[in-house]
């Protein structure tokens, strides 16, 4: 009795007690750097073969970032972990139906539909960056791991790399539309939350995270970057054209 | 220059005929040779040969421009001139009849349905190839002028591939 009284007074007293930490700093940095890198990768490709070097750098950074996010989905903070936001198909379908009638359950972290988008974007962007390592532009540039595979397979992966971009772009557009729907129609500013990491809690069971575990995140990123560097450095140099 | 052109044409013809034979070799019954070679097949073989040689000539220029190889002016100039000459073969190697699609050719139907755009891109390429040849005649190092001239041609390759080459 006194417990619930206390809770009520604290809610009345200040809005602040209602605010919980949801997105840790590494998740937020990951999200916005991925946005910038996605744009930079597009631009450096559009600028032409002379800018290939920078396109490659974008790709390396994306591999490290997405690799980090996947590891973070296993060992990161509460709302970053896959197990805490990937729901069963039944729950997901129910959420989808409910959300159309504006009576869906609120989640502090990713909602069940958003969870699908997270997984789709992570996987497709990872595939996009990894296939890029094996490409051949049939002009002057090849990916750093091109020499490991046959010419035929390389051209197939190049084709995949070209087409998958448009699918990812479609998913990104859908993602942005969903965010805007939340911000403007559901009065839930999840866009701001991706900057501040904070959300107002709608139910007492929702968990606030106590720390961003930044050092763990830094270690994961460094290890992934070292592994990628080692792989790229040890790849054989491809000779594309004989000297005639 | 004339000599280069002659050598190139010979090389091109040789490559083209090798391609022709390769294409005809498999199920060749008693074909009627009196009508001359199949013009579509010949056009495809000529342009493929031209593209192969353009690509081969361009790659070492790219290596020099990107700092992966030393800048050897004589070599760069020779290759740039070759590309310019080879690019002329493309003017006449895309006749209507050679719109046969894959696997014989990766030229998309857009080459013929959007001829104006294709011709414009080809013309851009030839102009930039001319600039590259001119610049490589004077530049002694992998200068910015050289890199820009190279970059313009590389962008033409890419732009045309994106619109007109099946991938």
Image (cartoon, coloured by chain):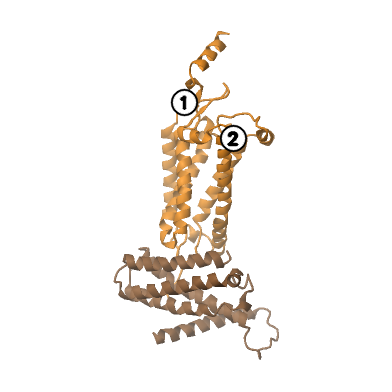
Question: What residue sits right under mark 1 in the picture?
Answer: A210
Tag 1, which chain? Answer: A
Q: Give percent across and percent down for residue B70.
A: 33, 67
- State which mark lies toward you, 2 or 1: 2
Q: Residue at x 38, y 68 (%)?
A: B149
Q: Earlier in the sequence, mark 2 or mark 1?
A: 2
Q: Residue furthest left?
A: B140
Q: Secondary structure at mark 2?
A: loop
Which residue occupies 60% across, 73% down? B112
Return the mark for residue A81.
Answer: none
Near-viewer residue (B112 or B148)? B112
| Residue A185: mark in rendering | 2
* Chain ID of residue with mark 2: A
Q: Secondary structure at mark 1?
A: loop
Q: How many numbered callouts?
A: 2
Q: Quadrant of residue B84?
A: bottom left
- In this rendering, do the residues under marks 2 and 1 share a single chain? yes
Q: Is residue B4 above or below residue A134?
A: below
Chain identifier, orange in the render: A
Q: Residues within 10 Å of mark 2 (few under 14, many from 20)?
A: few
Q: Position of residue A23 (x, y in %)?
A: 49, 32
Quarter in which the C terminus of chain B is drawn: bottom right
Do the CB atoms of the residues marked 2 and 1 lie less than 8 Å apart? no
Bin the neighbour count of mark 1 within 10 Å (Cα to Cα): few under 14, some 14-19, many 20 and up: few
Residue A197 placement (x, y as % from top left):
47, 32
**Relative to A151, is A188 above or below?**
above
Question: Which chain: brown?
Answer: B
Which image quarter: residue A215? top left
């Amino acid at each position: 009795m006194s417990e619930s009284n206390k809770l009520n007074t604290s809610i009345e007293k200040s809005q602040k007690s209602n605010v919980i930490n949801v997105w840790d700093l590494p998740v937020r940095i990951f999200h916005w750097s991925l946005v910038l890198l996605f744009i930079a990768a597009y631009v450096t490709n559009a600028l032409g073969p002379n800018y290939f070097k920078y396109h490659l750098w974008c790709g390396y950074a994306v591999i490290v970032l997405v690799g980090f996010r996947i590891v973070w989905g296993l060992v990161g903070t509460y709302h970053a972990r896959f197990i805490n936001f990937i729901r069963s198909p039944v729950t997901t379908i129910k959420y989808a139906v409910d959300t159309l009638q504006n009576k869906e359950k609120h989640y502090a972290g990713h909602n069940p539909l958003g969870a699908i988008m997270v997984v789709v974007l992570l996987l497709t962007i990872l595939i996009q960056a990894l296939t890029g390592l094996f490409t051949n532009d049939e002009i002057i540039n090849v990916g750093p791991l091109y020499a490991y595979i046959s010419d035929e397979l390389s051209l197939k992966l190049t084709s995949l790399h070209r087409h998958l971009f448009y699918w990812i772009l479609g998913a990104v557009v859908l993602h942005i539309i969903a965010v805007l729907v939340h911000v403007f129609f559901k009065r839930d500013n999840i866009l701001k939350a991706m900057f501040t990491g904070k959300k107002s809690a709608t139910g007492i069971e929702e968990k606030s995270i106590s720390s961003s575990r930044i050092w763990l995140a830094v270690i994961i990123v460094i290890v992934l970057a070292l592994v990628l560097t080692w792989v790229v450095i040890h790849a054989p140099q491809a000779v594309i054209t004989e000297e005639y | 220059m004339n000599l280069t052109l002659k050598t190139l044409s010979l090389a091109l013809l040789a490559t083209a005929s090798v391609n022709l034979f390769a294409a005809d070799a498999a199920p060749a019954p008693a074909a009627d040779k009196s009508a001359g070679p199949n013009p579509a097949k010949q056009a495809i073989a000529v342009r493929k040969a031209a593209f192969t040689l353009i690509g081969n000539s361009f790659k070492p220029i790219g290596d020099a421009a990107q700092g992966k190889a030393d800048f050897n002016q004589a070599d760069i100039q020779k290759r740039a001139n070759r590309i310019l000459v080879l690019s002329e073969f493309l003017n006449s190697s895309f006749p209507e009849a050679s719109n046969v699609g894959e696997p014989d050719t990766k030229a998309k139907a857009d080459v013929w349905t959007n001829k104006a755009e294709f011709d414009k891109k080809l013309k851009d390429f030839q102009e930039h190839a001319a600039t590259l040849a001119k610049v490589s005649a004077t530049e002694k190092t992998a200068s910015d002028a050289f890199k820009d001239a190279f970059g313009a041609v590389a962008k033409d390759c890419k732009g045309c591939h994106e619109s007109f080459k099946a991938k």
